[in-house]
Image (spheres, helix red, strand yellow):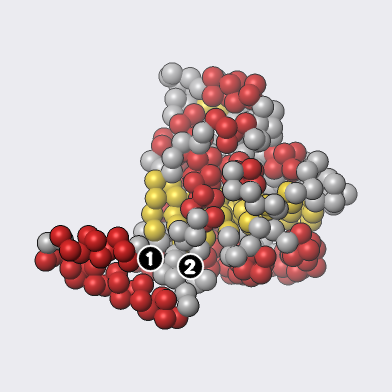
Amino acid sequence: MMMRARRRNRGAPRAACGYLRQECATLARALLLGTSHMTTLLFSHPACLEHDPGPHHPESAARLRAVLAALDDPEFAGLERREAPEAALDDLLRVHSRRHVERTLGAVPRFGHVGIDADTILSPASGSAALRSAGAVAAAVDAIVAKEADNAFCAVRPPGHHAEPERAMGFCLLNNAAIGALRAREVHGLARAAVIDFDVHHGNGTQAAFETDGSLFYASTHQSPLYPGTGAADETGVGNIVNVPLRPMSGSAPFRLAMTERILPALDAFRPNLVVVSAGFDGHRSDPLAQLLLDEQDYAWVTDKLLEIAARHAEGRLVATLEGGYDLTALGASVAAHVRALMSV
Ligand SMILES: [Zn+2]
């Protein structure tokens, strides 16, 4: 990079010199300190705002607008913002069957809405939004593996963790987190990839994609009973699945205990080469779809803990992707707390 800067500098107009001097100074300081000037990436795409499951649907574009507004605060000026590419078909086919991909994307209507089930509704922009959401996580994995940044947050919708290899459901069309994890393993050769899911709902889709493959790990805290009804503690896959159901009205203490007693030790023992976070914020006490009592501090806390394990085993590689979160104020504040923690590396 310094070589490129020097080459550019020879022919650069005077106005560019100040910037180049600053860039070189930053790099020199980083080398001196033994660190780089890496940062947190923020992936999103305008297409994710266009997916419209219909009026009064909780998974609305207003959610993503609230997230992006929260991250527009000057405290997040240091985020490096990138536009999400569309996922490639190969990325999708590592998790989903060709039949699922063709059926789901083929059902996208030219006008109006089409329901896959009572909750999962397609509009004309849904295919593009789903491809950008999966593509965000795939591109974030590429960038983090290439050490272009410390970690990444994907502000995308539709969410993904309910999407099973053969089935779209629960507002989810493609399993964004699983697609990122499998890309890390099969394109970048990382031996072990983990998805940690603190959304209030169980990620049945991610579990279904991972449960027979010991090189993958999935752990979830979620309210039980609650949609989709999976995620019992005795669903353990091939020893690579950890489910910790939480009773309605559980707050910070049981959530943190589930993490410190069950999930974090199991993740530590798995020694992931990449940590993917299914970052759903519908466990917040204000959320209208569930009855857990978490708050922003809990999301900052768990993010710090996951960063510690990523630093220990995965050279810090962590990619988070937005899942649920349906109270707009709580969602904005929770994402801010999560991303603030990511940036504090
Ligand atoms: Zn959820």
Quadrant housing the N terminus: bottom left
Give the residue type that dot 2 points to. Met
Dot 2: few (<14), some (14–19), or many (≥20) neighbours within 10 Å? Answer: some
Q: Residue tagged by mark 1? A: 78
Q: Is residue 299 above or below residue 177?
A: below
Q: Is residue 330 above or below residue 28?
A: above
Most foreground residue, 159 or 12:
12
- Residue at the (58%, 59%) spot, across then down: 318
What percent of the width, then of the height, locates residue 98? Answer: 63, 24
Q: Is residue 168 visible?
A: yes
Q: Do callouts 1 and 2 mark residues in contact (Cβ within 8 Å)?
A: yes
Q: Residue tagged by mark 2? A: 343
- Residue at the (67%, 65%) spot, across then down: 313
Residue furthest to the right: 234
- Residue at the (59%, 26%) spot, across then down: 101
Disc 1 is placed on an element classified as loop
- Residue at the (15%, 61%) spot, across then down: 12
Give the Cα distance between marks 1 and 2.
8 Å
Most foreground residue, 304 or 332:
304
Residue furthest to the left: 14
